[in-house]
Image (tube, rainbow, N blue to C red):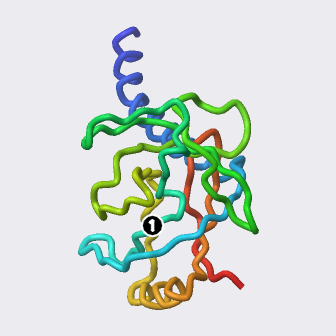
Amino acid sequence: MKEVNKYLLCILMPIVILILILMSSYYIILFGEEIILKAAPVDPRDVFRGDYIELKYEIENIRENQLKDIEIINDDEIIYGFAVLKPSNGYYKLDFITRDKPKKGIFLKCHVSKNNKFNNRKFEFKADYNIDRFYVKENTGQDIEDVSKMGDLLCKIKVYNGNSILMELYKNE
């Protein structure tokens, strides 16, 4: 009888793990708070997955005074942290980034590094939130890019406990 239980456990364990992975995303969708971020897309194409919009958010650009208790010394150093957001004129903006997980408010998990890519002295640091791709129907990426050139592209994101899912792109009316 114990042999049967071992085999049953081996069969059920991967199924349980897959269900837990899926449930974590659905939990964010069901119970997460909805926020709006301003974005500017780039329109690439993936041979295997089709058209997608690669998004760059205003909250990715960080000034040194927005880093709370974080010190980045090396150019290639990446720090794990939490971006605390605050509402401003209908969408959310970056307030500050900290290493300590906030106890309340809206915040996103992020990776912070020095901004060496564009040599932009106004923003010395950049953050990655892992919400930078949105897949769209084939040949519709150009329409979204046109909306973005006017500065009217907004992203609806569900956030729960620092985890986030990009739900929708739409035009600011």
- Look at 54% across and 44% down and name the residue there: 65
- Look at 44% across and 40% down and name the residue there: 18
150 lies above or below 112: below
Q: Position of residue 43 (x, y in %)?
A: 37, 80
Mark 1 Cα-neighbour bin, 10 Å: few <14, some 14–19, many ≥20: some
Q: Quadrant of residue 12?
A: top left
Question: Foreground: 77 or 11?
Answer: 77
150 lies above or below 14: below
- Look at 40% across and 10% down and name the residue there: 1
Seen in the image, is 36 located left or right of residue 46?
A: right
Question: Foreground: 39 or 124?
Answer: 124
Type of the residue with mark 1: Lys
Q: Which residue is mark 1?
A: 56
Q: Position of residue 32 (x, y in %)?
A: 69, 49
Seen in the image, is 30 located left or right of residue 168?
A: right
128 lies above or below 10: below
